[in-house]
Image (cartoon, rainbow, N blue to C red):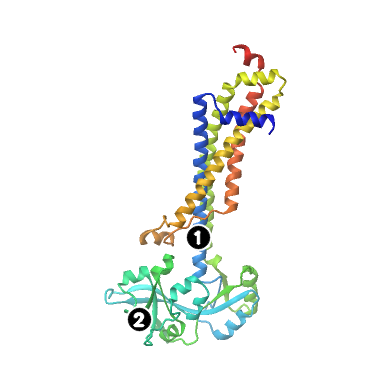
Amino acid sequence: MNLSRQIAWRYLRRPTDRLVSAVGFVSVLGLVIGVMALVISMALMTGYRGDLQRKLLGGNAEIFVYSVGGPIEDTERLVAAVRGTPGVAEAAPVLFKSALVTTERSSTGTETMLKGIEPARAAESQMLAKIVGPRRAFNTREGERGVAVGRYLATKLGVTAGQSISITVPVEDNGSFLPRSASFVVTNVFDTGFYEFDARWLFIDLHEAESLLNAPGAANLLEVKLVPGADLDAVSKAIDARTQHRYAVSDWRDMNRQLFSMLKIQQLVLFIVIGLIVFVSTFNIVSTLIMTVHEKRKEIGILASMGAESGTVSRIFVWYGTMVGLLGTATGMLLGVVICWVITRYHLVSFPPEIAQVYFVSSIPFVTRPIDLTIIGTFSLAVSFGATILPSLRAARLNPVEALRHE
């Protein structure tokens, strides 16, 4: 250990003045609180954005192929063409429509979105498995038509598994729209944690949706899942080329671009605002160093009289402030990571339905990424080091004769 660092460590470990010691403790505490707040806030935004993206992709797909003018013609041919595209893991047709649901408790009707999917797709993701249910089928054991209902929607409709509901959809017939209704038995009440699904959507077998809408083989959307690591843009262009530009091709980013752009801006603003806490805490470090320089005038004078260069004296207080910054940063990051783990492990941040409606999810995990911790640690150490410059220069300019005159 060099001389400057050794002396700085001694000053930090054994302050002789109680006031300097108290101010030093406050400076470290302020830095700890600032860094901890930064870690928690970044983990909150990262976890929220990641959880929202995971649930969006879990219930839908990465790429969507659809016909602008109406239902897809020759669905089987289109599915075969898309499945043959490099990078595509699976392509499945779906049929969705606005619907009105009535039950014994809700006779006036509740507007929902009806989506027909292939039950076999439950093997694709955990979210689809939750929606379809443990039997991996929509029909009941008695052969009745089944429907999966989200828990918020089921509460609103007053139904549970095994009860019947009536679904009414508008069907085009010779230029006019006529209502068609059918009864379904609730086979599963799912809870995905994604409010949009749990409160608005009904899921039935694709063939039952075609029968209800009187449109056999006429899906209006193709959902495409990619193999892990596939380039989203490249696969989208390849699908567009293979389908001879006859269909619109979009991806999940296009459909949610505004939402995720807003979240990125929000995270940046949050970092800047809370980062001010860290920046303000450096004023305490400056105060601590100035008071330490004043307290250690005698020692500085003795060092200078013994031949210590001004650079050596200056480095003592640079090391002192850097150690304070390192201690506060490390402690704040450790506490932040532990608090994030506790919040995520025990689901301490969860929302009631009226709040989940705004944030789209029922609970938020706090995710700490190494890149976020690196940025926070670098920022905190940088401002801590910056706070040492002025006091260290002041200590280096101290005249040894003046320092020892009254000693």
Position of the C terminus, as image quadrant, is: top right
- Residue 142's place in the image compared with 152, above or below, is below
Q: Which mark is residue 185?
A: 2
Q: Dot 2: what SS?
A: strand
Q: Where is residue 288 in the image (x, y as percent from the top left)?
A: 55, 29
- Residue 398's place in the image compared with 113, above or below, is above
Q: Is residue 289 left or right of residue 210?
A: right
Amino acid type at image mark 1: Leu
- Residue 156's place in the image compared with 181, above or below, is above
Q: Position of residue 104 (x, y in %)?
A: 27, 77
Label 1 environment density (alpha carbons within 10 Å; few <14, some 14–19, many ≥20): few
The foreground one among 83 and 161 is: 161
Q: In this view, does 56 lie to the left or right of 84?
A: left
Query: How many numbered discs sit on the rendered protein?
Result: 2
Position of the N terminus, as image quadrant, is: top right
Amino acid type at image mark 2: Val
Query: For the view shown, which residue lies furthest in the top direction?
Result: 405
**In the image, which is nearer the foreground, mark 1 or mark 2?**
2
**Visible residue check, residue 273:** no
**Visible residue check, residue 93:** yes
Residue drawn at (60%, 52%), measured in percent from left and top? 371
Label 2 environment density (alpha carbons within 10 Å; few <14, some 14–19, many ≥20): many
- Residue 177's place in the image compared with 352, above or below, is below
Residue drawn at (51%, 53%), measured in percent from left and top? 43
Residue drawn at (49%, 55%), measured in percent from left and top? 366
Which numbered disc, 1 or 2, marks the residue that appears first in the sequence? 2
The foreground one among 112 and 159 is: 159
Does the CB distance between marks 1 and 2 fall below 8 Å?
no
Q: Position of residue 160 (x, y in %)?
A: 32, 74
Q: Residue 259 carries which label?
A: 1
Q: Quadrant of residue 378?
A: top right
Q: Dot 1: what SS?
A: helix
